[in-house]
Image (cartoon, rainbow, N blue to C red):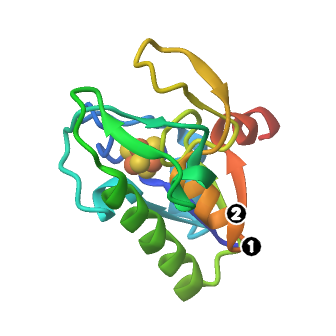
Amino acid sequence: MIYIISACLAGFNTRYDGKNSFSEVFEELVRRGKAIPFCPEQAGGLPTPREPSEIIGKDGFEVIEGKARVLTRDGKDVTEQFLKGARETLKLANITGAEAAILKSKSPSCGCKKIYDGSFRGVLKDGLGVTAAYLKSHGIEVIDSDDYLERH
Ligand code: SF4
């Protein structure tokens, strides 16, 4: 089994704040050739660092359906970049044969269980980010990074 993995988990400074979410567990997966690091937001054309974004609406599934948008904290619409990043991630999964992805908890792209509620006040709610929802809707298993760490 080979995984796609959120690049920030393996130590790449891809986060909105120019930092990472490194864990040795995830770096080791990459080192052993078990996981391929990728950042959907960068692949979608967004700069690093960048304004933080949240889904305005229910979740990533609604964004895919055109019923919700992704906005930065200062109100810029980045929905198209988020969708492009999701499509590029699926492309990588298809090229590599990855059937699962380990994705960073709580991200508006990568979150698999919880995302921020669109208020930019640090409030979480149930839901998937845009890339997580897109991968899941195309048959790729999505695994929350915190869940993975608890089990390994
Ligand atoms: S989009 Fe995903 S991979 Fe990129 S920095 Fe955010 S959580 Fe990490």
Q: Residue under circle 1?
A: 139
Q: Quadrant of residue 127?
A: top right
Farthest-out residue, right: 151
Residue at horizontal 46 percent and vertical 61 percent from the top: 37
Q: Position of residue 100 (x, y in %)?
A: 70, 66
Q: Position of residue 62 (x, y in %)?
A: 59, 51
| Position of 147 relative to 117 (above/below) | below
- The reply to whether dot 1 and dot 2 touch (C-beta < 8 Å) is yes
Residue at horizontal 66 percent and vertical 72 percent from the top: 2
Residue at horizontal 27 percent and vertical 45 percent from the top: 77
Farthest-out residue, front: 67
Q: Residue under circle 2?
A: 136
| Position of 92 relative to 11 (above/below) | below
| Secondary structure under the numbered disc 2 in the rendered image | helix
Residue at horizontal 40 percent and vertical 19 percent from the top: 120
| Secondary structure under the numbered disc 1 in the rendered image | loop
Query: Which of 35/6 is in front?
Result: 6
